[in-house]
Amino acid sequence: MHTLSLNELAAGLKARKFSSRELTQHYLGRIAERDGALNSYVTVTPEIALAQADAADARLARGEAGLLTGIPLAQKDIFCTEGVRTACGSKMLDKFIAPYDATIVKKLHAEAGMVLLGKLNMDEFAMGSSNETSWYGPVKNPWDLSRVPGGSSGGSVACVAAGLAPVATATDTGGSIRQPAAFTNLTGIKPTYGRVSRYGMIAFASSLDQAGVVARSTEDAALVLQAMSGFDALDSTSIERPVDDLVGGLGASIKGLKIGLPKEYFAAGMAPGVRARVEEAIAQLQALGAEVREISLPNAPLSVPTYYVVAPAEASSNLARFDGVRYGHRSAEARTLEELYKKSRGEGFGAEVQRRIMIGTYVLSHGYYDAYYLQAQKVRKLIYEDFKRAYETVDVILAPTTTGTAFKFGENSDDPVAMYLNDIYTIAANLAGIPAMSLPCGFSEGLPVGFQLMGNYFDEGRLLNVAHQYQLATDFHRATPKGF
Amino acid sequence: MSLTPEQVQQVAHLARLELKAEMVPTYAQQLSNILAMVDQLTAANTQGVSPMAHPLGLTQRLRPDVVTEPNRREAYQAHAPAVEDGLFLVPKVIE
């Protein structure tokens, strides 16, 4: 059952080949047997899952089920789930039982009828590219247990790649959906900024954060993204605009589609095995009728430095709420209020989060604000204008997702700058707020390689259409890791 | 731009973060490396460029000033480290 697509699972449920309870038990069994090797789940929720499965079976019996009703899903542990620990990969929130549901949790479970299998491991507060910053220990890559799954959505990709959930939610602030998807042979999409509600999603960098999905195919991703998207009055950054039919447009031909290849993304720095696979993907899309042309995004090389001003600045402000008073870790050692703040935060946050809080505090401090923060927001405008100009002549932009394949544990963990450069190809889409996705295009020395598609604002449907047409012509996305 | 251990301690104070003493030299080195990478931004010509405010040029939406939330104080205080009579407890502030 764990090899079936969401459409196949829906058909099986509808035809009563298996019940949602049986399907859920199958996944719970796989998690119990196999997640010890991966560490992808932080919390498994069997009681909730079986109750939701029974409710789904009742809905199916009454003929009131939607397409996703009864299909299990796992949530990145950044989304608040009422009555369930929501720890965001941090000691700070290790004992935090969320008192309410995130909007997407409501939409996917209460409304669509999906079954919550559990909460997924992640880099602490989504800050990391390897899942090594999690308080709950690193997640292993099911393709090679000595390698990272990528981050910050490492638990999301590891569990889906290993068949420990059919599909999972994820979030992307600088590449946290796309880089891990590329490292584990999955399809992951980050929609336009504001397309999916962030109510109940723990904030990292609010001008960049966006929720999305990781799946085993574009079709699966489209089905879940469709159910997650839409306006939400509870999120002040949510966009008031109807959601396109993401699934209905998958079958359209891409003949005549104009694809831009930004020359800055194809310069030196990419591993030869990645370059070869991405070039093959371009040739495949050309064979399907797409037209390819070189474009320039001249300010894209400044994405990483821009991001490492803007994101820490926002993080230092967002994480000020963790003060040891209202929720989260509280130091037992504090004698004064100032000590309470300092010790609670010093004990509760790990090293990467502390680094980013300090960088953010520094770039926002008196005397440095103009030189760092204001300059970064101006360069961000230039990056945004590069994309606007590009979309006047092309429909989508194609680029590599990562410079290499999944790296070994410890390889970058002592050198923050080396780790940050992992997201060199993904960050620009967050800075501009455009939708972007990664999908599999083959292997290099046995490890998955992904390529990236970036679209114009609200062009999720077109991205998914191109990706689906590519996946109809290829079967890289069908490969699964040995042993799972 | 490089940060001394003393500057790191000052920034940590501003962020209300107590650092382990043995981490301070490491942080000074790492934060200096990050700032050196960020310094590439100074070379960009941004004359006449207005800073980015929102990718879609949107402004904050207003809602009618009506009560939308019920009182859930007990639920929201259930996970607080220390509460008494509906109030959050902190160490003594005024001697």
Image (cartoon, coloured by chain):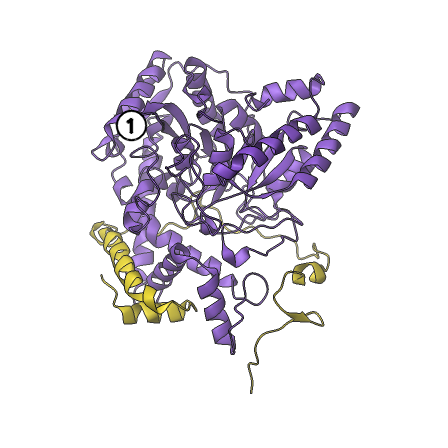
Image quarter (top left, top right, bottom left or bottom right) of the C terminus of chain B: bottom right
Q: Chain of mark 1?
A: A
Q: Looking at the image, is A359 positioned above or below residue A146?
A: below
Left or right of A424, for residue A165: right
Q: Which residue appears farthest toward the bottom when viewing the image?
A: B95
A230 or A360: nearer the eye? Answer: A360
Residue A189: percent from the left, percent from the top? 46, 33
- Give the x, y percent position of residue A224: 57, 30
Tag 1: amino acid: Val
The residue at which mark 1 appears reads as A274
Residue A221 in view of the camera: yes
Chain coloured purple: which letter? A
Place of residue A172 in the rendered image (x, y in percent of width and height, measured from the top left): 45, 41
* Chain ID for yellow: B
Whether residue A120 is situated above or below residue B90 in the rendered picture? above
Q: Is residue A229 visible?
A: no
In the rendered image, which quarter contains the N terminus of chain B?
Answer: bottom left
Q: Residue at x 69, y 17 (%)?
A: A17
Residue located 31% across and 49% down the image:
A306
Seen at 31% across and 24% down, the residue is A278
